[in-house]
Amino acid sequence: MGADSRQGKRLVVAGHGPAAHRLVEALRERDAAGAWTVTVIGEEPRAAYDRVALTTHLEGADLAYPAHGGGVAVRLGERVTGIDRAARAVTTSAGRRVAYDALVLATGSAPFVPPVPGADLPGVFVYRTIDDLDAIREYARGRGTGAVVGGGLLGLEAARALQGLGLRSAVVEVAPWLMPRQLDEGGGAMLRRHIEGLGIAVRTGVPIRALEAGDDGAVRRIVLDGGEPVEAEVAVFSAGIRPRDELARGCGLPVGERGGIVVDETCRTADPAVWAIGECALVGGTVYGLVGPCFSMAEVVADRLLSDASTAVFEGADMSTKLKLMGVDVASFGDPLAGSGPGALGVTYTDPVAGVYKRLVVSDDAQTLLGGVLVGDAESYGTLRAHVGGSLPGAPEQMLFGGTEEAGGDLPGSTVICSCNNVTAEGIRRAISEHSLTDVPGVKECTRAGTSCGSCVPLVKRILDAELTAAGIEVGKAICEHFDYSRAELFDIIRAGEVTSFTRLVEEHGTGRGCDICRPAVASILASLGNGHILEGEQAALQDTNDHFLANLQKNGTYSVVPRVPGGEITPDKLIVIGEVARDFGLYTKITGGQRIDLFGARVEQLPEIWRRLVDAGFESGHAYGKALRTVKSCVGSTWCRYGVQDSAAMAIRLELRYRGLRAPHKLKSAVSGCARECAEAQSKDFGVIATENGWNLYLAGNGGMRPRHADLFATDLTGDELIRCIDRFLMFYIRTADRLQRTASWLESLDGGLDYLREVIVDDRLGICADLDAAMERHVASYSDEWRDTLDDPGRLRRFVSFVNAPRTPDPSIGFAVERDQIKPLPLEVKR
Amino acid sequence: MSAATGVVVVGNGMAGSRFVTELRARDTATPVTVFGAETQRPYNRVLLSNVLAGVTRPDHISLVDAAWYAAHGVDARLGVEVTRVDRAAKTVHASDGTAVPYGTLVLATGSTAFIPPMPGLRDGLPEGALVFRTLDDCRRITELAASARRAVVVGGGLLGIEAARGLAGRGLDVTVLHLAGHLMERQLDPAAGRVLARTLAALGIGTRLQADVTALRTAGGAVTGVELARPGGGTEVVGADLVILSCGVRPEVALAREAGLAIGRAVVVDDELRSVTDPSVRAIGECAEHRDEVYGLVAPAWEQAGVLAGLLAGTDPAARFTGARQITRLKAAGIELASMGETHFGDDDEDVEVVRFTDAARGTYKKAVIREGRLIGAILLGETSAAGTLTRLYDRAGPLPAERLGLLFPGMGRAGAAGEPAESPVRMPDAATVCQCNNVSKGEIRACWQAGARTAAGVARATRAGTGCGGCRDTVEGILAWLDGQDSADVA
């Protein structure tokens, strides 16, 4: 039967997730004649959103896809309940009956919850929708522990999310290693090191037996088939998905043995008027859980609906993935598990301390790249993935460690760059030349490449750069794909525009939601410019782990506490307080190289209690956790020392109190020596001062650490005030112009004109910015206040240390200590039995 | 009384001959008598595998020529064995019936090839079965190899693999039978052993691991095969008309034991290489046990020889041997291998950092073991461009680059990306040891060049660099080329 010709044909789409959204958009884009009217019926109360980025919802990101244009009726909060194939109509939960000429099932999947006792307890969640996340956030408030069942990609994201909600978090995976579908054993083991390094406990190779309730009837712990139970006041299941195929079953359409609506390569079911796309479809015997294949299916169906002559087919998909998981690059491409036995041919590189694992799998004759796994450093992902199925263009070590430059210009045109949206290198090149594109956002808009998971954006940028360079256009040095500016330029934008939030910055000057490169960099700039407390509002979510809890994360998930001891000068009374705190909380104490005392082994919920005692005794944060001024070390100086020519201790204290809390691109260290004997080792510091008969000599840009650098003598025989003015300007100029995570030493080395230029800028005021630099430092000095005192005074911020509020005296069972030389030492998280 | 002050050296191998030349370089007066069981003049045993492989001629591995002994007043008794030591009378008795009194006795008897006790060997080795220890063995194997077709090497240690490579190079079908679970288990970890086995396979050398050899099969007094115990019981035979037994060595300590000296695994000596039993007896090389360690490599033996020469000549009374780091390099065409220190640590061992690269298809395996920021062990297999750097870092316990990748791949990684290769002589400190066997530093080579030496041979004459395993010869030439290039600048 033909459709009503006036109204056109009627398309009904069951479900409104990413696949459905893409189908409708693709159809609208190409259906210029308006052949189809579309009705979308979606069960969730909100329109389609970017489920890949689900976790960022907790950070306040807006995940919504653009709304569909005209001719599309979207009914939300309504579910298709039945299909009358004979009459070509669906019935809905709202009791309506909607007729169709074509029906597309895009019902997605449901999280699989294994049938274990207690799976229905209060406090047990799945991790699939925005509603799920909102419910988890609400429930987690005031609770102390959380655990995720399932160590796949989503499960790990969920575990990190629980941690971000203030819970002590754990992951339980039944397979012997994490991400078993994407990684091999070595990669899984390396990932585990990273995850544990973040303070998330990991248990692998253990099936769960039950979830047990606490006294309140809500879930309290997860009992495993072996080993200690895992404490969990919040439990999240992320143990795989099951296709939502019940509608197909209900109307007699064939479904797979393990679920999934059976479709052919055009995504058509046994009924020619009914199609299925996305995670509910079983195509070629496979249910695809990645967004890329789902989009491809949507495109195929759109094409077929628009033209009977269409030859579009779904040809399977590249299951390669690259993701940033909790700051760790993880990638898998091709068939990473091909021949993973010990004798298998492969190229493997492991550096556990750096957290790097790389494996390439090659064919028996070593000629063909079959797949691979990258953990910790996935820079070469794009290049490698492009060569799967072909021969490696160079020696494997070149490909693994140095082979990123050749990619871009040299990639064959047929290479798929964006597997989510099926965009080839040739497609990108064509778009660049046809539309005269000059930036990544332009390429994204034009080709959709990089708009889903985003992992190919670096490769897109390299292709773009190569094309632009070939066309004689200059290529900029942007900090990352979200901003077309360097850190120094971003600093100017933030300062000039008085931008105070990342959200505003990225809205006005960038694209997307930011990444692990630009977010902490911007957080540091905001802090440098004195934008209030670093745990204030949105800023909190931008910080690194250490800044997050204002303490340094240590091996076993505990934290260390370092009170400031300016110039290393401390009264007996204060020493006694430190001693008493360490004793009362059972902390390991160690004198640091920076002349202060580090207290190790504090659990997160103890931090406020510890700091309460310290702050009450007059201590303040030492910023050992921050990219900020650490210490100003000093010798005892002319007051006591027979050789001293100036009071170095007093100067050190003056400097430390002036620059304390100053956020910078990297940590800052300083020292003051009272005579040329240089007992304070000032020449190895970012700024070092050595007393002379006539005043002070200033040395800049020294560095201990991995690549030591002697500081350069910048100025001699300065008075105290002159000295401070020089340092003020030096620090502010550095903060404004350095790259992210660049210390003063490498900053000065990369500064055009070097030390002489620096003198011209901050002594001769060649750029005319000295007044501005001085004012900025004055603002810093005037606005300084102790982060820990502020935190203690603010219940909102204290809530971050949430288990303190709820269960102040319950030690976390997953933290263990041993005793060595009369003090505690950490046990790795999994050692405890 | 000259007899009481004379030095008698028993053994004229790598250690003994080196000691004699070292002593004469410092002391031309003290009477020296050296006994050597082998009739030919001393030769570089390390290079025997090169001779077997046909890449070095036998007459090119001599260490000391006959004229030298005459010119330096050394009484060399070649082909004469010492049969007894009379410590009370401070006299040695020799197979030629002579007795020589000594002031100091230096034992440098080395070691002998270990022949496992098994049926078929009671009456000595059958025709076609040999050990691989001496130049004579080497000559005999070479002769047999000319007509043999299938060779079996029993023992997959360093020497066994070198022998196997040599035989394969002569066109034989070669199988290595090895008792342990992986090849060269003393120097390599299991993964490296697997890669090595693969490399050997590509060179036509088969490997059987966990091969429990129970007997040699013979027919008419000639070997026909090697019998293996099957894991589940029973035996199987690997056919062969040439069998090389390379089952390790045992220190040759019969004389010392008979003389009542303290023996552990070898003659127990202190830091002055002095027997703990008798201060007038010293021992060096493979027959000496120092701080529980018996060294089987040439570099420690030569170091001991130097120390002892300085002590006995009185030129360096403070000289002490305090132990040596062990660096092994395999010499066989088509197999690049260097191993040093503690290589067996894995990723899960605490307190150590293991950086590892494996490329089985190309036969590359690289591993660096780091503890407390210092290299404590390394394996380089297949591609050894980093060997020089790693050896120095290991030997000197030097600080490591922050980016570990550069350890395994010199010049790679961010640190060295734009820089010159780590092996560049420019970046090598003067104190860096270039020749491990003879402990010659870059500074000494530079001094040698400044004194006029312009060729590797000239440097070898002056410093001995490159005369041990020969592995550093390229580096020496590189340094010379660099110095030549620096000529004008340096003189100014």
Image (cartoon, coloured by chain):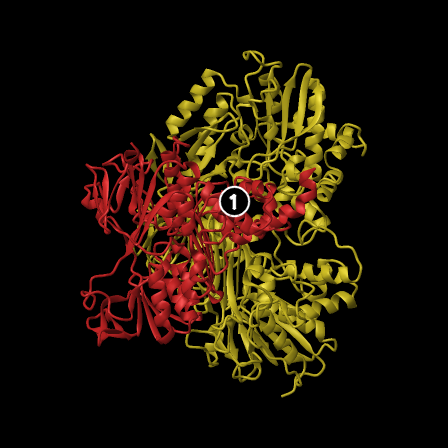
**Which quarter of the rendering shows the N terminus of chain B?**
top left
Q: Residue at x 29, y 60 (%)?
A: B247
Chain A representation colour: yellow
| Residue where numbered disc 1 is placed | B462
Q: Name the one closer to the observer, A102 or B177.
A: B177
Look at the numbered disc 1 and give the secondary structure of its residue.
helix
The chain ID associated with circle 1 is B
Above or below A280: residue B288 = above
Q: Residue at x 66, y 51 (%)?
A: A480
Chain B representation colour: red
Q: In this view, does B236 lie to the left or right of A380?
A: left
Task: Please identify the residue farthest to the bottom as the structure is shown.
Answer: A1
User: In terms of image quadrants, where is residue B127?
Assistant: bottom left
Above or below B337: residue A556 = above
Above or below A464: residue A4 = below
**Which quarter of the rendering shows the C terminus of chain B?**
top right
Q: Where is residue A165 in the image (x, y as percent from the top left)?
A: 49, 45
Q: In this view, does A659 lie to the left or right of A214?
A: right
Identified by mark 1, the residue type is Ala
Q: Where is residue A582 in the image (x, y as percent from the top left)?
A: 40, 27
Above or below B459: residue B151 = below
Q: In this view, does A508 lie to the left or right of A824?
A: right
| Mark 1 surroundings within 10 Å by alpha-carbon count, few (fewer than 14), some (14 through 19), many (20 or more) | some
Q: Name the one closer to the observer, A176 or A482.
A: A176
User: In terms of image quadrants, where is residue A599?
Assistant: top left
Q: Name the one closer to the observer, A675 or A170.
A: A675
Q: Is residue A119 visible?
A: yes
Q: Position of residue B436 (x, y in %)?
A: 46, 47
Q: Position of residue A154 (x, y in %)?
A: 49, 58
User: In terms of image quadrants, where is residue B54?
Assistant: bottom left
Q: Is residue A771 left or right of residue A49?
A: right
Q: Is residue A341 visible?
A: no
